[in-house]
Amino acid sequence: MVNSEKSIKIIFAGLDEGGKTSILNALKKKNYALDDIKPTKGINRLSLKVLDVSFNEFDLGGQEMYRKIYLQKKEAFYNTDLLFYVIDISAPERYSDALDYYKSIVEILSEREERPTVVVLFHKIDKIEKIKEEQVQNVQNSILNISIDLDLEFFRTSIFEPQTLMNAYSHGINRISKQTSELSAQLKEMAAETFADAILLTESNGFIIGEYAKDDESREMLMNVYNYLIGAFSYMYKSLAQTDKPERILIDWEDKGHSFLDSTEIDNLEFFFIKYTSNPRKVVQKFVLRSLIQSSKQIRNIIKSYFD
Ligand SMILES: Nc1nc2c(ncn2[C@@H]2O[C@H](COP(=O)(O)OP(=O)(O)OP(=O)(O)O)[C@@H](O)[C@H]2O)c(=O)[nH]1
Ligand SMILES: [Mg+2]
């Protein structure tokens, strides 16, 4: 699925105003005010390197004139590993256009016998008053019919519920990695050893590499912690000199438990483990640190072979 140069192509496609750029901004923690987002002109590309894997994300502006160009030239869709297809669930009058565009993309892919992982986002679920469940089911069925042979999953998302975005994004990334189950198993073990309810492994830019949560509630807390840390904190952290950087940061969420941020270096790159526990009394500092170092070694090997 992933080609040998270890370069991963992720595209975000869908009609104009669907929310693609907003989703990417939310995932990348660019806390722009909502009104600041302008329609995307053409294609926006974001590149990020994690170890020796480069992730290239393409935000395909969805206005009709751009869609026409992509469908005509087709290259925009070539060699895609992961396609996020964004549908504004609160705009039923546009479902049929959204389906047509999706169908055209799938046709281009099948001409070339490409089978990327597809994640369909029914987006803007916060606008519940506009959602007609029966119509949504019809759209879902049509997409299923069009997508024979594709690894496909549906998610319901909103930028006002960041964990919904994280779930969808993590699912997509996980599907294109062969090593995922091993990494999740490792994170689960690490969670057990460190009395964490949820644990997240991120690259210093905030890119999520792996995640484990024992239930939805702790996943939601983990996401809150992640937003908090990756937003203001990582900026501050980066500006610190190496010698001034704390090994561990503890945040007390009062009645909601504690979270920890531990940094670890793998091949001169910085990674963070974000942990959340609802019961901090259980956490024994020394033991936690020791097991963290042990687990990091194993995780290091998994990360290195993540997209092999
Ligand atoms: N209510 C709500 N509005 C959203 C959500 N996500 C995005 N929006 C709004 O939807 C509008 C369009 O968002 P964009 O991110 O520009 O959409 P886009 O898909 O990038 O549009 P193009 O670049 O033209 O293809 C903006 O006004 C956003 O604030 C969401 O989850 N809920
Ligand atoms: Mg856009």
Image (cartoon, rainbow, N blue to C red):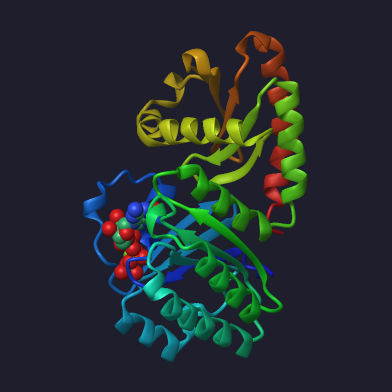
Q: Which residue is at the front of the view, 84 or 18? A: 18
User: Which quadrant of the view contains residue 210?
Assistant: top right
Q: Position of residue 80 (x, y in %)?
A: 56, 73
Left or right side of 305 for 79 = left
What is the quadrant of the C terminus in the image? bottom right
Task: Give the quadrant of ligand 1.
Answer: bottom left
- Answer whether residue 13 is visible to the viewer in this image: yes
User: For the view shown, which residue lies furthest in the left direction?
Assistant: 35
User: Which quadrant of the view contains residue 162?
Assistant: top left
- Answer whether residue 22 is visible to the viewer in this image: no
Left or right side of 14 for 294 = right
Image label count = 0
Left or right side of 30 for 153 = right
Q: Position of residue 17 (x, y in %)?
A: 32, 66
Q: Which residue is at the front of the view, 219 or 143? A: 143
Q: Position of residue 8 (x, y in %)?
A: 57, 64
188 shown above or below 196:
below
Left or right side of 126 for 56 = right
Residue depicted at x 66% and y 85%: 113
Q: Position of residue 177 (x, y in %)?
A: 69, 57
What is the quadrant of the N terminus in the image? bottom right
308 shown above or below 253:
below
Residue depicted at x 70% and y 20%: 195
Residue depicted at x 37% and y 74%: 93
